[in-house]
Amino acid sequence: MHDEEAWRSMGSFSPDPHITASPSAVETQSTSSEEMVPSSPSPPPPPRVYKPCFVCNDKSSGYHYGVSSCEGCKGFFRRSIQKNMVYTCHRDKNCIINKVTRNRCQYCRLQKCFEVGMSKEAVRNDRNKKKKEVKEEGSPDSYELSPQLEELITKVSKAHQETFPSLCQLGKYTTNSSADHRVQLDLGLWDKFSELATKCIIKIVEFAKRLPGFTGLSIADQITLLKAACLDILMLRICTRYTPEQDTMTFSDGLTLNRTQMHNAGFGPLTDLVFAFAGQLLPLEMDDTETGLLSAICLICGDRMDLEEPEKVDKLQEPLLEALRLYARRRRPSQPYMFPRMLMKITDLRGISTKGAERAITLKMEIPGPMPPLIREMLENPEMFEDDSSQPGPHPKGSKGGGLSPPSSAYPWCLMLCNAPAGCMLPLCPILLPGQGGGRLGPAFLG
């Protein structure tokens, strides 16, 4: 870095135009500084080129812990050894590790590090050496997390992982249905997609309920946040299961669809936008913890319309932002720009969600029956679908967040969010709790 700055400063140096140098002075200068004006016409030595990373085959930054490796695998191995991490493979302990898949299975990645010759002892020696040195500003050790933030990160990461299996945990399967050409809508694919999307929404609600502080918000605010962010999180989740080599995306049951099939399943004109976003996520190399934290930040956001207590929501979001900032910086000490880049993806996700709401209007005309209720509530304002299932007449009082009762259009969310042990506090809530007869869907969704 210092060499580069020195070269830049020399290159930008401008001599005084009023001073005329004599030929002898020029000759003296050219022979006294071989770096600036080489006396020999021989070319400079070529830059040192390292073999690709032995672990993931990405571009190597040098030899670390005994082998040629990239910064990512170097840091992963160091953290794993220093913290005595114990990982689990959810498949057959033979996951393929490359620069695209390396964050999907930590167990197999660590085993690959050992197989190619990375040394535990080299990590220990390196750590002991650093203890004797003064901590430098910007080093990973300077981004210490408080016990409270460590606990928050653990809870959010666990909530994400237990409601969203990683790609290496899934047994992929494909279908030949309309795989080669785009059509307006493949009803078979739509039926399958709508079934899986409904299950994904339920998992997102489960994820939300496990976030510290979320269930402490009013039911109305929980519903407002979920309705506003559910499509954002759904898109983020599915885009992390993008496989660029095959240009496919994989759902939670393992169903893997190519770009054409995603279009025909109902994405329509939204398809290429979603795939482009998935491609933009790849360079960030987000792990499960970062994806979970970013999802939580998407959800718990005080700028959503119709919130009863936006300040309370903002206060819940603050530690999530700090946790992601410190975690991302500690994980990538030489890449301070990663945290703001991750946050920028929230803006992209909101843009996709806006397009998704527009797509819902045309999709309603293409499907033969009513839109599944949870998808309907996720995609749009209920007024778009009044002729499907909404009851005539005005919404209940307080439907815009000003009263105790959520709007009638939010009843599917209530079914999943209500945890009242002894009766619902919302006068107009339609949920019948266990022991009160139970609703048609109530007992299945009560947490």
Image (cartoon, rainbow, N blue to C red):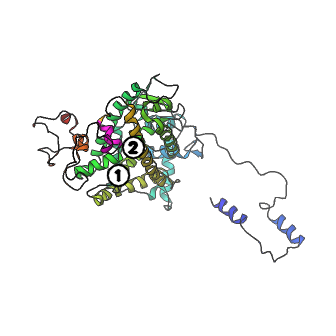
The N terminus lies in which quarter of the figure? bottom right
- Find the magenta span and give its range: 373-387
Q: Residues within 10 Å of mark 2 (few under 14, many from 20)?
A: some
- At numbered mark 1, what does the secondary structure look like: helix, strand or loop? helix
Q: Which residue is mark 1?
A: 150
Residue 288 appearing in the image: no
Number of residues whose C-alpha sits closer than 10 Å to that of mark 1, classed few (under 14), some (14–19) or many (20 or more): few
Horizontal and vertical percent for residue 382? 30, 44
Where disc 2 sits, the SS reads helix
Residue in the foreground of this view, choosing between 435 and 403:
403
Asked whether residue 338 is drawn in magenta, I would say: no
Q: How many marks?
A: 2
Q: Residue at x 36, y 54 (%)?
A: 320
Q: Position of residue 247 (x, y in %)?
A: 52, 33
Judge by depth and name the residue closer to the eye, 36 or 184. 184
Quarter of the image where the C terminus is located: top left
In the image, which disc is placed on residue 357?
Answer: 2
Would you identify the image quadrant in which residue 167 lies?
A: top left
Distance from disc 1 to disc 2, alpha carbons, whole Å, reads 37 Å
**Relative to 290, residue 142 above or below:** below
Q: Which numbered marker is on residue 353?
A: none
